[in-house]
Amino acid sequence: MEENSNDTSSHKSRNRRGRSSNRKELVQAPGSSSSTPVAVAAAAAPATVDPIKQMLALHPLHVEVTVSTEEGSSVVIQFHYATELRLVTSRCVVLTKERPMIPGAVVLTDMLSGGDFLDCLFPDDSGVASPNPATIHQLRRYYTTHQCPPSNLPVGEAIIPAEIGRAYRWAQLLAGLAFPYSQQGEPAVQSALLAEMAQDMHAENKANSGPQSCTASGVSSERVHVTLSAIRRRLRSRLALQQHLLILQGATSTSSIPVPSECMSMLFPGKVCSELMSWRTITWREYSALASTAAIREAGLATDRCLYFRAVYQRKHVDMIAFACISPDYPQVVPLFALEMKWGEQLCPYAHIQQLEAEVNVHWSELVPGNTDRRHVLPLMLYRLAMCLDVYTEAASSRLVDADPSAAANDTHFHKEKIFFRPARGPDRAFPLRYLPKLRVFAQR
């Protein structure tokens, strides 16, 4: 019995030595000496994961929604969920029905492509800033790593990288994500605006069976309908604006402005002498460098999200340059114009320029009777500028003739072609810029 136990123990020890030698052979590389083992465990370790790439990771599944119009155009929106940032981002593509293009025309300002098509679908919702306050430090680390911090990064906000799309607040609400607002009282304001938009869209939608109430408490039930209606309205507005810009970029006269024929006889006189010489796009940097646009910029009405254009008018020796600011939410937000004027080599008084700016910027609602369809408000405002330049030159010439009758013989004099009773009125010497279509005369306000 003692010999059997010794044999058994010696057999177990030999087996242990054999297994140990086998493990050593696995660790040693073929042909290498026993003193240089290969780190197999290190080779089997998983690859290092890029933390920035992981932070911007999107879920492999996405939701695709197609919003169509009766005209045949549609917007395809893809909603993605950012797993680390815990918010919903979106990208969109516009599919338009074939339209007869203008011969030889090249689209210089594309209003239908790009990631900003759905910007400001609702007030102050550009989709650039993260709606999730928990992502501020993560996104700031992203920009610090890439050494490209945004120049306009607000305090307490974080900018969503463009490669993952836009994080609109309306998209978060549709997905059931509710984040706190950055400013106190903002939810109540947004709810009131949403309720107002719902009422406006119900009034526009003739297919509805009857009036429906939409109070702040009932906004949530209307959110999907209101959002889809807003997207359709944005698509129709951008299609109309794209067509207008395509015509304006080749305009060389006021008659080239695409004003609807029914509006021409209702809103303007039969003859306008001032000509639109050119229309071109300018950058935000160019716009912000102009002294004439300072008041609009300081009021916060012009931002880098808007589109900017430069229109040149001329009537003989009088030149007028109009700088247009078009909001992403056009035509719900009407364009704003800043003017520069020269009478020959002399700059026109700023008080005169202010009167022309007020006529087009403040009293634009007269161009849209009933405030129903604003899609043509840009060409209507451009045509009104030409009309105002006519009245200004003739009224200013009448003032000069009243002061010095010999000025009527000068080449710089403009003969009176428009009907107005007084070239100036009141302490501010107001010009007769208001047109009364029923009487076919101009008067002061």
Image (tube, rainbow, N blue to C red):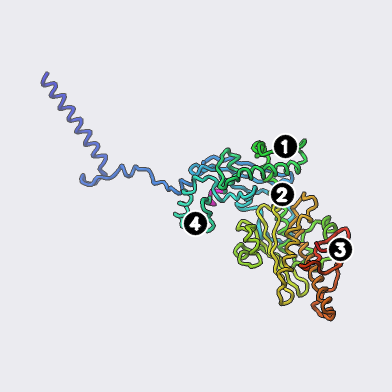
Disc 1 to disc 4, C-alpha distance: 46 Å
Closer to the N terminus: mark 2 or mark 3?
Answer: 2
Q: Is residue 298 magenta?
A: no
Query: Magenta span: helix, strand or loop, mainly?
Result: helix
Disc 2 to disc 3, C-alpha distance: 35 Å
Q: Nearer the viewer, mark 4 or mark 3?
A: 3
The amino acid sitting under disc 4 is: Pro
Screen quadrant of the N terminus? top left
Identify the residue at the far left of this view.
2
Screen quadrant of the C terminus? bottom right
Identify the residue at the far right of this view.
439
Q: Is residue 162 magenta?
A: yes
* Magenta-drawn segment: 161-165
**Residue 434, percent across and down?**
81, 62
Disc 4 to disc 3, C-alpha distance: 56 Å
Closer to the N terminus: mark 4 or mark 3?
Answer: 4
Question: What label sits on residue 213 in the rendered view?
Answer: 1
**Residue 131, percent across and down?**
55, 46
Q: Is residue 131 visible?
A: yes
Q: Which residue is mark 3?
A: 441
Disc 4 to disc 2, C-alpha distance: 35 Å
Disc 3 to disc 1, C-alpha distance: 44 Å
**Residue 95, percent across and down?**
67, 48
The amino acid sitting under disc 2 is: Arg
Q: Which residue is mark 4?
A: 149
Tell me which residue sits at (11%, 20%) in the image.
2
The amino acid sitting under disc 1 is: Ser
Front residue of 156/101: it is 156
Dot 2: what SS?
helix
The amino acid sitting under disc 3 is: Val
Dot 4: what SS?
loop
- Do callouts 1 and 4 mark residues in contact (Cβ within 8 Å)? no
